[in-house]
Image: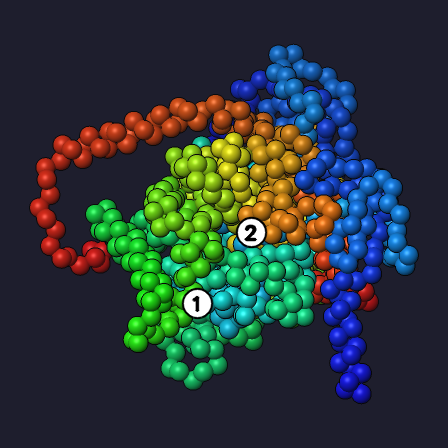
C-alpha cells in the first residue's frame, strides 16, 4: 500500500515537470545505434528519440551540442546507501534484508550519480553461504529510503561461495590443530555446498507443508497453517523463480558446484557475482543461463583472485554469457564508464558491447530492462550527459536525470560550493559559541574508555 | 659443457645491455620534452637514443621496425608501488612490505624484490617501464628502490638501489577507527600523542647527528650502528626523505621540520594540502600524488576533490608525479593521470607526470623520462594515446632491448579462449 502511494507521488512529481528535449547530442542508445540527435522526455519517460524529433509545446530545451548522452549506468553489485551489510553470525541469513537498513543520506549516492550511475543492486555482504535479501535502488538523492527503491524490481538474495563464507570457520592458523574459538561452520568449499543443499532441502519440505495445507484447505478440511519460517520463505521464492539468486563466487570449481546444485533443485542462478574465473567455465555458465557480473581488472588481492584476468568479461561475452561489470565499491562505482572501456582493450569488445556491460546487460540481469538500460521510447528517462565520449579516459559527467528529474548538474554543484562552505563555517562558529558558553567541565578522572 | 653454458650466458647478458642497433621507422614520435613529430624515425645505438628525425639512415645491420601508424612514447614510471614485495595482498606469507618497529632506516627493499613476481609483466604490459618500490609501516620504514620492470634478478632490475628514505610523518588524530568500540581520545590527548611522535622523530635525527660527530672523531668506545649508518646520507642531504604526509597539519609540520633539519624532501600521498601549497612551492619540494581514482576523505568534501587535486598543484606551480601506491592497480597509472585532465590538469602535464617529471624527481632525467638523444631507449610503441583506456601498448623497449608484453593474464586468456 505504502509503495503504491509513493509510486503515485513520484509519478505526480514527474508529471508536474514540463517536458524537455535534450538536443544535438551524440545519442548512444546502446540498443538502437548511435547518432547525432535529440531525446524528448515527458512525464518522466522517454517519448521520442531521433535525429529529428517533434518538440512538444512548452518543452524546455537542453542544448547538448558536442556532448554525449547515454542511458543511466546500472551497477549490478554495490553496498552503498546501507547502515550495515553482513549478518555474519549464521551460515544462512536469508531472514534479513537490505530493505531494512537503506540509508538515503549516504553521500555515496550523490557521488555515484556524479559518475553517471542511476540504478544499483544493493546486496547483502558475503560473510555467509546464504546471505540476506537484496534491494534494487535508483539514486534518487534527496528522497527517503522508500523513495530510493526501484519499484517493481524482482527481489533478490545474496549467496556467497569460497573464501569469504568459509573464513569464519577457519582456525587462525589454517590447518593447525590450535583449539578454535567461536568457529562457525563451514570452513571449506565442501561445507559451503553442504550448507546450501541443507537449506534447500529444508525449504523444499517447507514449501511442501504449505502446499499440503492449501490442498487440504481447498478440500474444505479444517487444518492449522504451518508455522511461518522467515528464513525459508525467501528460499521457497527462489525455488519458485520469484526471487533471484545473486551469487558471489571466484573459482571455476565453486561456480560449477552452484550451477549443478541449482539445476538439481530446479532453479536458475540469476547472476554469478565477481565470477573472476568465469572465463574458465564460460561454456557451462552459458548453458545454465546464468548472467555474470564481474570486475574489469581486479586481481591478486586474495588467493581465489590469483587467476583473475582482465579478459574475463570479453571471453564470457564471446562464449554467449550475459555479462555486466560491477563496482562493489563506492569509489569504482563513479567510473564504470572507463571500466567498460577496458573490455575494448582486453578482449576486443566493440563500443556498443562495452557500453552494454554497464547498461542494458545489468538491466536484463535484474529483469528491469523494460524500464531502463537503453535510450528507447517508453523507457524511464534515466539519462547521463558526458562532455566527451563516455568510453574515453578524459570524459566527465555533466548532468544526470532519473525519471526525467535532474539529479546531478555539475554547473550547479560548482556554483553551490561557496554557499555550502559558508554554511559549514557558520555551523562551526555556532558550535564554538556554544562551547564557550558551556560551564567549565571538572577535570576528568581516569575513567574507563568502554562504552556504557 | 659448463664453460659453453657460461659463455652463452655472458654473451646473452652482454647483448641485453647493449643489443644491436635499432631503427623505428615512420612513427609519430612523442618526445614529451618537445612537441610530437609525425612520420619520424628513431635510432637506437648501444641501448641509447642516437637520433630522432624525419630522415635517419640506419647503420649496417640495424634491426628495422616498421612503426607506421604507431606512436612512440617514453616508457612510463610509477613513483610508488610494492613491486616485488607483495604478491597477494591478503596472504601474509606473500608480503614483505612492512617490518616490525618504528625506526628501521637500514632496511633495503631492493634485496627483497622477487624478480619473478607475476605483477611485474602485468604492470609492464601497460607501458610502465620502471617503478619505485616502497617499504611501509612505522615512522622510518626503510629505503625505497628504483627498478626497471625487467631483469633476471633484483641486481639487474635496480636503477637505484636506494633512491629515498621513507618516512611516515606522524598524523594528528590517528587512533581507534570510527568503527572501533573505543571512544576517541580527547583533542588534548590527540595533541599530546602527536607532539610526542614528532618529538621522537626530532630526537632520532639528533641521535643520527650525534652518531655522525662520534664517527668523525672516533673514541675507542665507538661502535658502528646499522640504523645510524643508514641515516648518514639523509642528514648529509645526499639521500632524499620521501615523507608521507596527507593533511595540512602533517604537511606543514613536516616542511618546517625538514627545513630546520636541512634534509632533502619529496612529499608523498598529499591529499588535503590546505594552505601549505605556497610553502611547498617556496621550498621547491616535489610531490608524489596517490591515485586520483579515490574517494574524498570527508563526507562533505566536493565529489571531485581528488580528481581536481593535480590541477590545483599545477596551478600552484608544484612539480608532481603519480604513484599507484600498490601493485594491483599499478597498470592503471596512466588513467590516474587522465582522470586529472578531465578536472583541470593540462594534458601535456598529465603525460609528463608519468614520464619526465618522475625521472626529474628521482634524479634520473639525464637517463630517461623523455625521448631525447643520449637517453636510454626506454620506450613504448602504441596504437594511440597511452592515457586512453582503449589504447594498446604494442611493443616495449628497455635500454634498447625488446621486452615481452606477455603475462600470466595473456597466457590464461589464450589458454581459455581456446577451450573447446
Q: Visible in this render: residue A82? A: no
Q: Who is closer to the viewer here, B244 or A247? A: B244
Q: Are marks 2 and 1 on the same chain?
A: yes
Residue name at image x 44 percent, y 53 percent: B237
Q: Is residue A365 left or right of residue A196?
A: right
Q: Name which quarter of the figure residue B226 lies in.
A: bottom left
Q: Name which quarter of the figure residue B347 lies in.
A: top right
Q: Is residue B249 left or right of residue A62?
A: left
Residue name at image x 45 percent, y 82 percent: A176
Secondary element under disc 1, as helix, strand or loop, is: loop
Q: Is residue A202 left or right of residue B192?
A: right
Question: Callout 1 environment at 10 Å: few (<14), some (14 to 19), or many (20+)?
Answer: some
Q: Is residue B63 left or right of residue B240?
A: right
Residue B363's spot in the image, x, y percent? 57, 51
Label 2 is found on which chain of the structure? Answer: B
Residue B341's spot in the image, x, y percent? 60, 36
Residue B395's spot in the image, x, y percent? 77, 54
Provide the residue designation for mark 2.
B362
Label 1 is found on which chain of the structure? Answer: B
Disc nearer the start of the sequence (2/1):
1
Q: How many marks?
A: 2
Above or below, comparing residue B250 to residue A261 in the picture: above
Q: Name which quarter of the figure residue B251 lies in.
A: top left
Provide the residue designation for mark 1.
B106
Amino acid at each position: 500500500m505504502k509503495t503504491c502511494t509513493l509510486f503515485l507521488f513520484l509519478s505526480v512529481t514527474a508529471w508536474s515537470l514540463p517536458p524537455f528535449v535534450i538536443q544535438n547530442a551524440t545519442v548512444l542508445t546502446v540498443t538502437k545505434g548511435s547518432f547525432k540527435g535529440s531525446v524528448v522526455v515527458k512525464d518522466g519517460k522517454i517519448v521520442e528519440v531521433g535525429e529529428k524529433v517533434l518538440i512538444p509545446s512548452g518543452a524546455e530545451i537542453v542544448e547538448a551540442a558536442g556532448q554525449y548522452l547515454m542511458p543511466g549506468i546500472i551497477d549490478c553489485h554495490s553496498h552503498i546507501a546501507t547502515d550495515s551489510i553482513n549478518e555474519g553470525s549464521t551460515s544462512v541469513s536469508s531472514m534479513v534484508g537490505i530493505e531494512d537498513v537503506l540509508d538515503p543520506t549516504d553521500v555515496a549516492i550523490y557521488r555515484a550519480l556524479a559518475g553517471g550511475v542511476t540504478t544499483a543492486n544493493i546486496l547483502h555482504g558475503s560473510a555467509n553461504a546464504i546471505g540476506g535479501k537484496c534491494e534494487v535502488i535508483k539514486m534518487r538523492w534527496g528522497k527517503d529510503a522508500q523513495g530510493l527503491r526501484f519499484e517493481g524490481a524482482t527481489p533478490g538474495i545474496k549467496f556467497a561461495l569460497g573464501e569469504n563464507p568459509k573464513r569464519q570457520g577457519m582456525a587462525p592458523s589454517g590447518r593447525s590443530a590450535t583449539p578454535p574459538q567461536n568457529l562457525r561452520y563451514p570452513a571449506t568449499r565442501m561445507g559451503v555446498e553442504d550448507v546450501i543443499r541443507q537449506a534447500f532441502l529444508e525449504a523444499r519440505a517447507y514449501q511442501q507443508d504449505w502446499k499440503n495445507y492449501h490442498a487440504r484447505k481447498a478440500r474444505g478440511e479444517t487444518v492449522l497453517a504451518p508455522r511461518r519460517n522467515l528464513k525459508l520463505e525467501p528460499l521457497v521464492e527462489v525455488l519458485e523463480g520469484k526471487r533471484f539468486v545473486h551469487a558471489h563466487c571466484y573459482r571455476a570449481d565453486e561456480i560449477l558446484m552452484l550451477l549443478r546444485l541449482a539445476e538439481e533443485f530446479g532453479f536458475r542462478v540469476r547472476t554469478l557475482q565477481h565470477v573472476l574465473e568465469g572465463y574458465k567455465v564460460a561454456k557451462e555458465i552459458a548453458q545454465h543461463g546464468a548472467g555474470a557480473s564481474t570486475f574489469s581488472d581486479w586481481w591478486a588481492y586474495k588467493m581465489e583472485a590469483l587467476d583473475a584476468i582482465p579478459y574475463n568479461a570479453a571471453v564470457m561475452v564471446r562464449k554467449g554469457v550475459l555479462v555486466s561489470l560491477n563496482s562493489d565499491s563506492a569509489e569504482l562505482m563513479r567510473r564504470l564508464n572507463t571500466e567498460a572501456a577496458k573490455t575494448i582493450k582486453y578482449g576486443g569488445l566493440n563500443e556498443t558491447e562495452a557500453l552494454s556491460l554497464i547498461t542494458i546487460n545489468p538491466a536484463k540481469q535484474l529483469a528491469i530492462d523494460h524500464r531502463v538500460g537503453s535510450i528507447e521510447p517508453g523507457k524511464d528517462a534515466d539519462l547521463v550527459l558526458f562532455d566527451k565520449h563516455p568510453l574515453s579516459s578524459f570524459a566527465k559527467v555533466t548532468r544526470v536525470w532519473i525519471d526525467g528529474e535532474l539529479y546531478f548538474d555539475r554547473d550547479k554543484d560548482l556554483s553551490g560550493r561557496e554557499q555550502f562552505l559558508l554554511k559549514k563555517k557558520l555551523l562551526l562558529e555556532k558550535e564554538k559559541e556554544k562551547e564557550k558558553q558551556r560551564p567549565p567541565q571538572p577535570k576528568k578522572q581516569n575513567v574507563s574508555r568502554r562504552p556504557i | 659443457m659448463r664453460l659453453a653454458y657460461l659463455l652463452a650466458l655472458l654473451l646473452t647478458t652482454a647483448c641485453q645491455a647493449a643489443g644491436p642497433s635499432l631503427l623505428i621507422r615512420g612513427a609519430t614520435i612523442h618526445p614529451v620534452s618537445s612537441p610530437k613529430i609525425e612520420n619520424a624515425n628513431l635510432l637506437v645505438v648501444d641501448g641509447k637514443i642516437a637520433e630522432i628525425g624525419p630522415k635517419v639512415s640506419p647503420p649496417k645491420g640495424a634491426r628495422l621496425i616498421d612503426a607506421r601508424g604507431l606512436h612512440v612514447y617514453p616508457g612510463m614510471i610509477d613513483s610508488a608501488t610494492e613491486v616485488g614485495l607483495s604478491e597477494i595482498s591478503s596472504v601474509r606469507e606473500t608480503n614483505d612490505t612492512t617490518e616490525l618497529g618504528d625506526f628501521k632506516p637500514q632496511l633495503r627493499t631492493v634485496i627483497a624484490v622477487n624478480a619473478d613476481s607475476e605483477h611485474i609483466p602485468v604492470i609492464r604490459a601497460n607501458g610502465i617501464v620502471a617503478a619505485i618500490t616502497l617499504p611501509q609501516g612505522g615512522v622510518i620504514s626503510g629505503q625505497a628502490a628504483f627498478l626497471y620492470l625487467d631483469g633476471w634478478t633484483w641486481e639487474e632490475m635496480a636503477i637505484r638501489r636506494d633512491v629515498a628514505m621513507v618516512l611516515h610523518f606522524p598524523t594528528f588524530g590517528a587512533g581507534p577507527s570510527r568503527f572501533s568500540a573505543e571512544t576517541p581520545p580527547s583533542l588534548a590527548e590527540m595533541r599530546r600523542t602527536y607532539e610526542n611522535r614528532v618529538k621522537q622523530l626530532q630526537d632520532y635525527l639528533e641521535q643520527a647527528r650525534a652518531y655522525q660527530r662520534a664517527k668523525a672523531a672516533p673514541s675507542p668506545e665507538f661502535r658502528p650502528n646499522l640504523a645510524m649508518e643508514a641515516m648518514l646520507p639523509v642528514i648529509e642531504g645526499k639521500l632524499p626523505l620521501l615523507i608521507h604526509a596527507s593533511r595540512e597539519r602533517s604537511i606543514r609540520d613536516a616542511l618546517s621540520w625538514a627545513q630546520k633539519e636541512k634534509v632533502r624532501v619529496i612529499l608523498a600521498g598529499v591529499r588535503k594540502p590546505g594552505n601549505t601549497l605556497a610553502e611547498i612551492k617556496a621550498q621547491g619540494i616535489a610531490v608524489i600524488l596517490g591515485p586520483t581514482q579515490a574517494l574524498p576523505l570527508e563526507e562533505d568534501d566536493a565529489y571531485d576533490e581528488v580528481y581536481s587535486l593535480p590541477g590545483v598543484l599545477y596551478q600552484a606551480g608544484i612539480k608532481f608525479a603519480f604513484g599507484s601506491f600498490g601493485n594491483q592497480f599499478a597498470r592503471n597509472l596512466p588513467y590516474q593521470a587522465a582522470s586529472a585532465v578531465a578536472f583541470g590538469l593540462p594534458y601535456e602535464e598529465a603525460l609528463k607526470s608519468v614520464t619526465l617529471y618522475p625521472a626529474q624527481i628521482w634524479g634520473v632525467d639525464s637517463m630517461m623520462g623523455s625521448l631525447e638523444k643520449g637517453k636510454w631507449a626506454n620506450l613504448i610503441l602504441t596504437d594511440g594515446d597511452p592515457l586512453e583506456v582503449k589504447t594498446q601498448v604494442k611493443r616495449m623497449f628497455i635500454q634498447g632491448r625488446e621486452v615481452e608484453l606477455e603475462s600470466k593474464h595473456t597466457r590464461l586468456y589464450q589458454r581459455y579462449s581456446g577451450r573447446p
